[in-house]
Every structure is written in C-alpha cells, then in structure tokens.
Image (cartoon, rainbow, N blue to C red):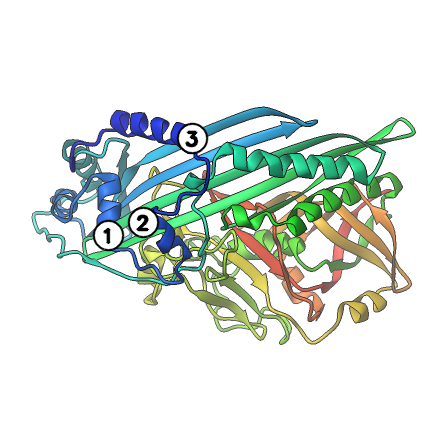
C-alpha cells in the first residue's frame, strides 16, 4: 500500500525475494523490468518506481513543500534501492556468500551556496517530512516557494542488459568462479593458491526536484576479481586481475573467463623475474588502459569544480589556457556503453554527457554539479554524484580518459633509451591543491635502448599532476579503456568510476627504485 512501506516491511519482503531468487530454475522471462533493461532508451514510466518506493506524486510534492517551508530556494529528493550480492571462492570451495539490501531517501535543500541535507530509511510520509524539516533548517525566511508539478524526464540508456541480476540465482554464478579456478590451476604449476570474488549489484533510483523534474534509473553492475599466489624455490609472489562493467551475467563469456585466469597467472609469475630500476628522474611510458589511474588521480580531481570554486585546485585559473601539448585532449564521459563509470543521469537528475576537460592542449571545462554550475554561470555537466541516499551529491568523475594521439606505441618505446614502462598501479596518494602525487607501480618493465626488457616491481613514481600534463611529449593511437573495478573516494564518499589512456610518454618523472 502506498505510504505504508516501512524499512522493516521492505527488508522482510526483500529477504523473502532474495531467498526465492536463489531457487529460480531459469531466468524469468515475464519480468516487466526486463524489457526496460534491454531497451536502449529509458522507456519506463515512473509508476513502477513509485510502486517500488511506495510513494506518489502528491506525497513527493508534500515532502518537498515541507523542505521549502523555511525559505529554501530549491529542493530535491533521491530515493534509492540497492541490492548487492557477494560470493567468495578459495581453493575450489565457496567460503563466503552474502547479500545486502539498502533502501531509503535523501532530501536536500539549497539556499544560495549552502546545503541542508537529511535522509531516512523509513519511506513513510511522517518520516520523510521529519527529514525534510531537518534539511529545511538551512534557510530562515518567510518567503517560500512551492514545488512545481512533476513531469517524467526520459533519458538514453547507456547500459542495456539482457538479464536482471535479481533473476540470476547463486547456482548460476558459482560455476563461473569454479571455471576460473580450474583454469588458473592448470595454467602454471607454480600457482599454489587462488581467491576469487564475484560481486553483482542492482540499483534503482527515483529522483524528483522542486522544479518539477522526475527521473528514474536502473543501474546494473558486476565484477570478478581473481588473486593468485605462486611459489618458486621457496619464494612467493601474488598478483591479480579483475573485470568489471555495468553488465548482466552475459558479460562472463568464455573469452572473459579465460582472460581472468590467464592475466592473473601471467601477472603473478612474471614477478619472479622482476627487478627494481635505479632511482632517479627518468622518462616514463604509461601503458594503455589502467595506467589511466594516474590521469584520474593526479589530474582529474583537480578539474572537479568544487575544488576550483574554493580555489583549492591548481587549475582554478586555467580555463581557456594552455595546460598541455596540442595533441593532448582529456574527457570525462558518462556515456560509454556498459562501462563501470557510466551513468544515464547523475544524482541530481541531469543527463550524463561527454565533457571535454582539455581540448587540443587547452583547458575547457570543470566537472560541475548544480551548485558549481550556478556559481560559474554554466550548465551542469552531469557530474553531481553521491555514494548513496545518505549523502548529498558533489562534482565527481565518471570515465576519465585521454583521446588517441598522433604517435604509435612502437614509436614511443623506441624513443626511450633508459626509462620505465608503467603498466599497473596501486596505492596512489594525491594532494589535490598542488597536484603532488605518489603511486606504487605494481607491474611494468624497464625500457633499455628502445626495447622492453626486464619486468619491474615495488617501484614508486613521484611527481606533480599539472607538471606531468605539461611533460607529456608523445601520445599513441592505441587508446584502451580500463576494464577493472575502480572505485573513487572523495570526502568520505565512494563511487564506481573508470578511466583510460593510450600509450603516453612523459619526458620526466621521479622514480623511486634502488640506490
């Protein structure tokens, strides 16, 4: 019944639903959401989402009017249901499996640049109005506005899937993990242990604001992470590989299953022959794909508008100024099909888009949410994101990547006499203001006389993001998007992201090795 769904009722219902899903003998074909998930356009009307959260147009407007009762300029409500499932397999045995259900609504009021925010896990008129009153306290004025009539906004769907995760029982998932494990143990006799994590998630959101905009979205997500331990002559090494996407179970094709096993094993056993380079400043070649994390951390965060609005970022005075060579272009894109960081809409109800941050070496835009867009008198870039209904949105990256350049990978490698080829990174640390960073290179190679030679490990690179941007001297035509399960943290909030890069040569970065 609308207006009577408490968190306890919801959880009771969800537990029963999850239990039933585990016993489904075949994928359900009558689910009304399935056609929506397969459609390239969001064609669902809002009624199915209203039923999911037990609300109505009139109820939502009443809550927003309560939130605006003390003179707020604007209000929005963000309803969210998220169903997550986890399975862990270690040495052929499933040793952990659990599900998590999250459900609630966040209510935000804006008064100028100030934000009032509250949330509740109880979707009832009483609970929502109490939360709205808390958010309303940001304002103190007798002049009030009422929420406009609500109208559904249609948007494209950048992550169509074939089968909803709710329709996939655990009996359908475990065989994928077992296949990967069996493959790992046959690829190299030095592998003595493997761990595999499988995660899937379904997210439903209903957003409405006091200007009358209503948007809905279904967000699927999945990841398999593989970790290996190998032993050789009493020495042990470990490494891993993972794949992630906004996909359904059909993502785990035989090809991807084989890749997960093969990449994890090869990356692990390569470490037995790895060396440390000599410490010092040298040319560094960033491999295509996941080394884009350096771009994300050392440069991307500095282009988020809240840091620039507060003049924290070194890029705060760089709009329409040259920041790199003319063959360097960087975008942040939420529209890449089925990529982990893609979003149909941001968490402020704005359409996602492809935003040019740097175009032909010139900085063109920051990543804007509603507040920063108003401050700079520009349109939001669809970058207002939040971890969940418990948080207010802020400017965040989606899929951040550099566009292909005029060179080739072979040209770049041949141009380096003594340098480092950095392939994968972990444990980065960045200071947003100055852009200084330190990254741990998990795997890569020495470059000697224009050739990749010995693998490297346990190497740090230290530098400054804006300076590295200026020091990019070659960009290849082999662009690759990272395929892993990247999650970005900022101000206590984490959101899924991705990044990408063609092969890139930086003229100098400090490398921490031996000596």
Pick whichever, 406 or 70, lies toward us: 406
Q: Is residue 439 visible?
A: no
In the picture, residue 16 is in which quadrant?
A: top left
- Residue at left offset 18%, top offset 42%: 55
Q: Check contact, mark 1 vs mark 2: CB within 8 A.
A: no
Mark nearer the N terminus (1 vs 2): 2
Residue under numbered circle 2: 32
**Closer to us: mark 2 or mark 3?**
2
Q: Which mark is residue 100?
A: 3
SS type, badge 2:
helix
Residue under numbered circle 1: 46
Q: Quadrant of the N terminus?
A: top left
Mark nearer the N terminus (1 vs 3): 1
Q: Position of residue 136 (x, y in %)?
A: 18, 41
Q: Check contact, mark 1 vs mark 3: CB within 8 A.
A: no
Q: Residues within 10 Å of mark 3 (few under 14, many from 20)?
A: some
Q: Quadrant of the C terminus?
A: top right
Q: Report whether 415 appears left or right of 390.
A: right
- Residue at left offset 35%, top offset 55%: 36
Q: Residues within 10 Å of mark 2 (few under 14, many from 20)?
A: few
SS type, badge 3:
strand
Q: Residues within 10 Å of mark 1 (few under 14, many from 20)?
A: some
Q: Report whether 114 appears left or right of 139.
A: right
Q: Which mark is residue 332?
A: none
């Amino acid at each position: 019944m609308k207006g009577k769904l408490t968190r306890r009722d919801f959880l009771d219902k969800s537990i029963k639903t999850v239990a039933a899903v585990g016993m489904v003998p075949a994928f359900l074909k009558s689910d009304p959401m399935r056609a929506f998930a397969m459609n390239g356009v969001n064609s669902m009307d809002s009624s199915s989402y209203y039923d999911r959260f037990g609300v109505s147009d009139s109820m939502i407007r009443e809550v927003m009017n309560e939130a605006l009762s003390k003179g707020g300029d604007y209000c929005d409500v963000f309803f969210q249901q998220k169903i997550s499932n986890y399975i862990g397999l270690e040495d052929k045995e499933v040793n952990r499996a659990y599900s998590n259900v999250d459900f609630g609504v966040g209510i935000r009021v804006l008064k100028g640049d100030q934000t009032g925010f509250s949330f509740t896990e109880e979707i009832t008129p009483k609970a929502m109005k109490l939360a709205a009153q808390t958010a309303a306290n940001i304002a103190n004025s007798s002049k009030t506005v009422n929420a406009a009539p609500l109208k559904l906004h249609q948007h494209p769907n950048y992550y169509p899937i074939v089968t909803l995760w709710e329709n996939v029982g655990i009996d359908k998932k475990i065989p994928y993990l077992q296949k990967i494990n069996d493959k790992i143990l046959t690829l190299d006799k030095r592998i003595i242990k493997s761990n595999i994590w499988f995660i899937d998630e379904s997210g439903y959101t209903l957003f409405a604001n006091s200007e009358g905009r209503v948007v809905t979205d279904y967000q699927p997500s999945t990841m398999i992470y593989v970790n290996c331990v190998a032993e050789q002559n009493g020495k042990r090494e470990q490494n891993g590989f993972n794949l992630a996407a906004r996909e359904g179970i059909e993502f785990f094709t035989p090809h991807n299953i084989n890749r997960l096993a093969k990449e994890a094993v090869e990356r692990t056993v390569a470490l037995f022959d790895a060396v440390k380079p000599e410490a010092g400043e040298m040319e560094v070649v960033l491999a295509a794909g996941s080394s884009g994390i350096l771009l994300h951390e050392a440069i991307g965060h500095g282009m988020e508008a809240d840091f620039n609005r507060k003049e924290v970022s070194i890029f705060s005075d760089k709009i329409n100024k040259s920041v790199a060579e003319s063959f360097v272009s960087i975008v942040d894109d939420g529209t890449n099909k089925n990529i982990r960081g893609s979003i149909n809409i941001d968490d402020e109800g704005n359409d996602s888009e492809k935003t040019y941050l740097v175009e032909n070496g010139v900085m063109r835009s920051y990543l804007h949410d509603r507040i920063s867009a108003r401050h700079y008198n520009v349109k939001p870039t669809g970058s207002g994101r939040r971890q969940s209904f418990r948080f207010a949105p802020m400017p965040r990256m989606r899929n951040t990547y550099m566009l292909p350049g005029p060179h080739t990978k072979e040209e770049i490698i041949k141009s380096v006499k003594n340098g480092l080829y950095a392939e994968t990174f972990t444990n980065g640390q960045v200071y947003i203001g100055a852009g200084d960073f330190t990254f741990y290179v998990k795997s890569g190679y020495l470059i000697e006389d224009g050739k990749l030679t010995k693998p490297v490990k346990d190497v740090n690179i230290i530098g400054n993001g804006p300076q590295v941007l200026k020091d990019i001297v070659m960009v290849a035509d082999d662009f690759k998007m990272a395929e892993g399960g990247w999650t970005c943290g900022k101000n206590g909030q984490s959101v899924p992201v991705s990044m990408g890069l063609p092969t890139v040569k930086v003229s100098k970065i400090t490398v921490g090795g031996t000596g």
